[in-house]
Image: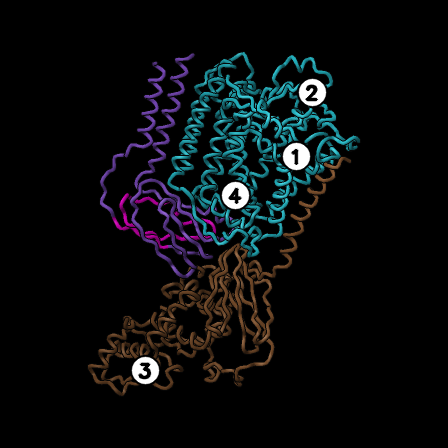
Amino acid sequence: MRSYLSLLLFATAGLVVAFAPLPVQPVAPQERTFQIDARQYAYSPSELHVNPGDIITFELVSNDVVHGLYVDGYGVSVEADPGQTATLTFVADQPGSFRFRCNVTCGAMHPFMIGKLTVGTNHWFYRGIGLAILAALGVLMSTKRNA
Amino acid sequence: MKRSELVARIVISTGVLFTIGAPIYMWTRTPLIHAHMSEEGGWTPDILKANVGEPLQLHFTSDDVMHGFAIGQLDMKAVYIEPGKVTDVSLTFDKPGVYTFFCTRWCGVNHWRMRGTIEVTGDSSASEDASVKIPLYVSLGLDIDAPHKSPAVPEMQPSAIRGKELVNNLNLDRLVVPESYKSTSPYQIFQQLDPASLSDSEKWDLVAYLWQTSSTPESIANGKKLYGQNCAACHGENGAGDGVFADDIAAAGEASMQSMSGAMDSMMRAPADFTDPKRMLSASPAVLQGKILRGGMGTGMPMWGSIFTEEQIWDLVSYLYSFQFEYEK
Amino acid sequence: MAKLELTRNRFIKNILVNRYPQLAVFIVMLVGYIFAILAGLIGTPVGSHNFSIVFVWIAWWAILILVAVPFFGRGWCAVCPIPLPGEWIQRGAVLAPPDKKAKWLNLRVPRMFRNIWLQNISFLLLALFSSVLLTTPNITGMVLAGMLFGAIGLSMIFERRAFCRYLCPVGGFIGIYAQTAPLELRIKDKQVCASCVGKPCYNGSSAGYGCPWDVFPGGLTKNTYCGLCMECIRTCPHDNIAVNVRPFSVDLAKPSSRIDEAFKAFIMLGSAMIYACVLLGPWGILKDAAYNVGTATWFIYVVAFLATIFGILPGFFTLGLLQKKSSLPLKHRFASLSTALIPLGLMFWVAFSLSFVMTNASYIMAALSDPLGLGWNLLGTANMAWQPMLTTLLAPAQTLALVGGLIWSTRTAQKAANEVNVSSLPVIGYCFAVTVFMMWLLL
């Protein structure tokens, strides 16, 4: 009986860690503009951080060939030829970490031309750590009993 | 050998031979024109042949990055050539001659070198264009390589809007566009204006107004579009000679050019700065047309003569002056 | 321990024992493999639109690491086309053994190479050149061709499947990860084997060939080296061999004490982390270093790669083992406890692969319609746009895989530690630390 109870306890804790909404510090949404330079095969800057609700504008400047920028999760994208800066504006309403990647084949390493946009906190990473701690503790405790 | 073994062997051999043979056969039967970045070979093949009146079927693919295809002097809508995919183009020529085709999407600093030719033979159905048009700078005998530094520059950016007001207020109806607008630089017009009645900045405003009225809004808009697609990558989106390839060109120029005189070198290596009044205000439209047509000058400036139509170059020239003058929107 | 004997079912047994179904699968695989070589060599150089890149590194890899290995162990080896031409030549037949045995050298692989070190090295070679390999069709084509012809050559010199057992870079990791799978091939009754004369399962008979994997089925206790080729089921005159479904990772309860296998676990763990960092991270300078083979920065990348795999990762691991004095030699403890890294490494690869597979799976339909980039449109999907799939599910799926891997490796560490009488806590701590690091890299 006891082992079922502790399993239930860990499972519930796990669900909470995984899905409970995190407390959000209310920060007034701003309009943020970033110039992102793209070259074979990297963006500069490649790591961006904004607050949830911000209205983001990316100005994509291609430095060598035609590049694109597609944001995972949001599904928005833009492409730019060298000499013609292209802009993409969207509202960062989903919190978390999202990779942005090139969506115009620009050479061999094109599939790995990646940047990272973090809106608010990278909550999945912290949930993951929480779940990892729960997992390790859970196994240790359950086997300590069986030992 | 057992019959099952024999059958199995036949099936395997047939399958393998077919798998090797069929694709190779299809591959040899598919004539593709491969587009690469210029450093990797540009167009292969880059010389095509056609006959007047017969449709020429072309199949393009890109082997690396996004490219485009268009034929010079025809004001043709460009076709995109995507990496790994095949784009079909069908062309019919009604005049014989040598046509230049070129890449229309920036594919590296040497993008403009990515050109090829189509040799079209046959009898022309259209009336023959007897003479080849001589560029204005040639007929005027202008040396487009000569330095052109304006002796006087305005203190603030001349405005065609203020110029227009001046014309209305002062009733200057004798101010007409001179016949020789194309062969005259803004500075020369500035000099010719009656010095007594107007201040220097007012005179420059009039020059700006004159320049705007010498071309149409459509032509300037077209010039802007052409500039963005073809020039901005080197000359900068704001005309300051600071485009994304400016550093590469300056470095390449330094490596390849023999040093003449110091100041001239640095002026010629980097892409021209159209926001520099000293350079622009003493350049006549004919000089600018010449530089665009002929390119070169020991720099990375491409030769656009076989690519742009005459109208397109004049559109570009009228747009270039908008980096110097504030135009009415 | 619950075991479900699949071969008890007559239909299943027939399908496995009858040579025709297997041959049909073999022909499809071989033809596909040859086509992949061809596509790589004569097709478009643009990887995303070339059948060889899309089908080898996206489609096949996804099926391998997400389905075949976790659920079928060495299931891929059972259908892999690489050894086939060589084996048919070596055997002198495509189906049942011929009356006249073919005369090839059939040398025994020298003792020095009868381990997985060559496979460790071959995998590392591919890994160090992976940025170029994964993106360049003609390189992939040449590597595939090299493996095929290498296997043919080895079959004419050595006995059995020398390439598969001792050289194949894929086989190296499929083998150790196969220990976690819920599928196995085992004998039913030890006594029957003890009294069997001639051992045709290993030596062959008129019904079939001796084990091509150089395994004695009678002594098979783990999945690591059995390639599920079904020859032994065909030859066993006593119907004493079965294919069973069993719980996951049963084999890990008997940890191996082999150093080559231990280092394979580190190679796989380390490569997954390095790939996640270099290929999926936002650091362009690392991608340049990995891609520009031959430059100084690439050499630095190679040194860092090897130092991580042979120095940093095993080094920290060993520190945890040095805590307690034990009667067993360090080597033994090291090898046994590194078993915990097997399920962890597998889940690292699953988490890593989910990312680039979900991002690029949309290339598969386009590659099927125009495999060579010649402008075909066989299925009408040649112009299907690139569209990442299920990106909102990706982070949760990766987290689940990594946390699942941690649970699994913790359990494995405990069982292994029990066997060698040390505390499992340092190893568990190590697994936790690398898992969190992998989460940071991927999420």
For the C terminus of chain B, the quadrant is bottom left
Residue that mark 1 sits on: C20
Badge 1, how many Cα within 10 Å: few under 14, some, many 20+? some
Question: Which amino acid does the dot numbered 4 rest on?
Answer: Ala
> On the image, which quarter does residue C101 sit in?
top right
Q: CA distance from mark 2 to mark 3?
A: 111 Å
Q: Dot 2 falls on which chain?
A: C
Q: CA distance from mark 1 to mark 3?
A: 96 Å
Name the colour assigned to chain C in the rendering.
cyan
Q: What's the residue at 54%, 61% (across, down)?
A: B60
Q: Dot 1 falls on which chain?
A: C
Task: Specify whether residue A55 is painted magenta.
Answer: yes
Mark 3 and mark 1 in contact (Cβ < 8 Å)?
no
Name the colour assigned to chain A in the rendering.
purple
Mark 3 and mark 2 in contact (Cβ < 8 Å)?
no
Mark 4 and mark 2 in contact (Cβ < 8 Å)?
no
Question: Which amino acid does the dot numbered 1 rest on?
Answer: Tyr
Q: Of circles 3 and 4, which is in front?
A: 4
Q: What's the residue at 32%, 82% (across, down)?
A: B191
Residue that mark 4 sits on: C290
Local SS, label 1: helix
* Region of the chain picked out in magenta, as a range: A30-59
Residue C433 seen from this side: yes
